[in-house]
Amino acid sequence: MIERKKECISMLLAGGQGSRLYVLTENTAKPAVPFGGKYRIIDFSLSNCVNSGIDTVGILTQYQPLELNDYIGNGQPWDLNRNFGGAHVLPPYTKTTSNQWYKGTANAIYQNIPFIERYQPEYVLILSGDHIYKMDYNKMLQFHKEKGSECTIAVINVSMEDATRMGIMSTDENQAIVDFEEKPAHPKSTQASMGVYIFTWAALKKYLIADEADPNSENDFGKNVIPAFLRDGRPMYAYPFEGYWKDVGTLGSLWDANMDLLDPKDPLDMRNPHSKIYARNYASPSTMIAPTSKVSNSFITEGCRIKGTVENSVIYTGCEVEEGAVVSGTVLMPNTIVRKGSTVSYAIVGEQCVIEENVTIGARPEDCLGEDWGISVVGHKKTIPSGTVIKPKEIV
Amino acid sequence: MKMCGIIFSEMYSDELNSFTHDRNMAAIPFGGRYRLVDFALSNMVNSGITSVGVLAKQHYHSLMTHLGNTQEWDLNRKNGGLQILPPYASESLNQANRGKLDELRNALDFLREDTSPYVVMADAHVICNMDFRPVVQAHVNSGCDITLVATQSKMSNSNTYKSVIQVDGDMRVTSYALDHVPQPGDYCGMSIMVMDRQVLIDTVSEFTARGVYFLERDFIQARFNAGELSINIYPFTDPVLRVNDIESYFSSNMALLDEGISNALFRPDRPIYTRVNDEVPSHYGMDCNISGCIIADGCILEGNAEHSVIGRGVRIAKGATVKNCIIMQGSVIGEGASLENVIVDKWATITGGSQLKGLETAPVIIRKGVTV
């Protein structure tokens, strides 16, 4: 029988806890963390897939999956409700011979070999759901095919300093990977892995099975599978990506990436109608900017009511800033209320928070001694009582 | 209590002909991100109605695009769902509007296939947030032939309403006038009514067969005056916006700036759904001055806007001033332009430096796609 096939499917690793986001990932997986006014982090990878013509995405969940499962639903917001393919949430499951969690990134894919084989793909794109970027994966796939590669890793040029914290590729003049180091003290290159891999499925499957059989392996792509490909001299290439790419794994980088949206040059190319970022939409009315308000240099999503001052901030769906409240340099996540007389500066405030009257959160850098200053963070669903002061760098 | 819904999408189209030359009333943009039909349709969905027929006579391309596969309203169903009911091409083309009974002929198959005992009918031009379940319950309890939803006129005004109704202590209609000015205490019809489905089918078949086409005049009023029709009124006390000409379209948009009205229309427990466009959040520029505005997603606002309703993806350039305006989706207001009391339809361009000024009662209207 001739079966239907997909040339390339995508597997999105969305099981990570994202512990460096502290309170923001206490009860939710990192990919479900809100970003950029109306999105969640995972929207970028999902939308990239769809905009690259990849219509089959396995989403591997493990840590706190409820919100993520609910968010993905049937995949419709991303046009991933398909008859053959589409979005599939893949949690770990019990089997007759063993019950196990996803031990590592490679093991997560290994455990889902039966899912992948249903589509008999030539290629598998492995993504992590914790980066903000727009990328045409199809171009990378063309590169993979042209080079005759079995493993292609997308790389981006970073500073020497950043290179010490990332996976670094050394390549020859043909972009063939000759060396790979995780977090090198003395980087040999500045080409950092973006956590975007394309494998030829037949080769990857072989290596996943071998990796699983090795009791000493941590079953991780970066630590085990990719080094094994390299050791065996398999054809591996680094695909150079140019454009905006940001790991939002820390509170500081999450705040930075939100603030990057205010750049009038639009480095993320958010307004390109041919590569829209899709998100699940909650029916909320247009935003009201009251006569008492003062708004400048900000991103404000539909469903808000702004009566106070908002400057240099990213305000998500359904937020309310009452008269006399001042929000500056701040990320207000969905459905948060800032009441009269409160000041929120240089902070991230989680979803569904209530900042009662006359609260002070954070401070402007110019009002602090250098080392005292940092982003203040309020977790999700918190009520901050009247008169509270939350200092810079404080996490509540 | 099972019910199905019928929406009339054409009422008053002629009075808003600046906007309806290529779209019908139901598809007119409203409140930044909505189309008029969204309110009646969302009310039906939020009342548990899963089978809705939308009657469309002409220029319904825009309405069809807006409704798409009706996923946003959760009406992409195996059983029921939403049906657009255009006329049978052979008969009604190029004919003047002959009334709701005539239009309802196109809904006969829809009504016959449905199994609900009751039908809720609503016009797209009446904006409110209403749960139809208590209306149907009141209809059943009343034992009347028809239930009309109406607002009570509190103070005297000189506006003419489509139907002006007087009732007794049990909310039974004692007087039914059409195109009339209400006295304080009178009820004004909202073009929302409930009937038994089978009664509606029989009425439409019988009246249209005799060449009688106007629902309000030929059926409700004539039968009522003959003592053959009992009418129950369901009083509605939340805010209602009726859009039936340019002036009311303008004031209804501006009414959204009133928090009381906005709270009543946009209740979190009964959301108003609309087509999703996946626009980026709006960007408010460094030197913008925005005050008292309703603003949808996707805008780039670098100039000034006051007391205005701004649709999706609108751009207001530096130094431009927009006051008392409705700017619809995708329009661009060029640098230094100044607009007051202007309605700019979709995808229009107001070139830099232009000065446009209308009156609150007679706003300047810039047609879709035009460059000024």
Image (spheres, rainbow, N blue to C red):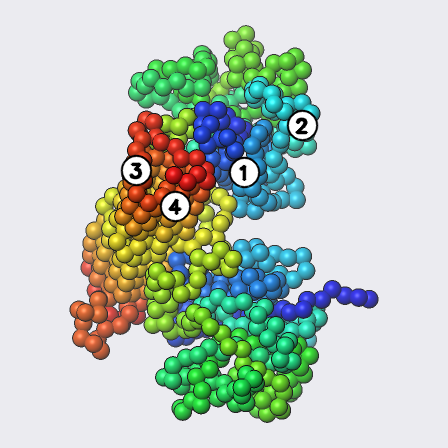
Q: Position of residue B260 (x, y in %)?
A: 32, 37
Q: Amino acid at mark 2?
A: Ala
Q: Contact, CB < 8 Å: mark 3 with mark 2?
A: no
Classify mark 3: helix, strand or loop: strand
**Residue on which the image places disc 3:** B355
Name the N-terminal-most of marks 1 and 4: 1
As rendered, which of A153 and B169 lies closer to the eye?
Answer: A153
Mark yes or no: residue B325 visible. yes
Mark linked to residue B332: 4
Q: Amino acid at mark 1?
A: Ser
Q: Chain of mark 4?
A: B
Q: For the residue carrying disc 1, how many other residues have a C-alpha within 10 Å: few (<14), some (14-19), or many (20+)?
A: some
**Residue on which the image places disc 1:** B62
As rendered, which of A383 and A312 lies closer to the eye?
Answer: A312
Mark linked to residue B89: 2
Q: Chain of mark 1?
A: B
Classify mark 2: helix, strand or loop: helix
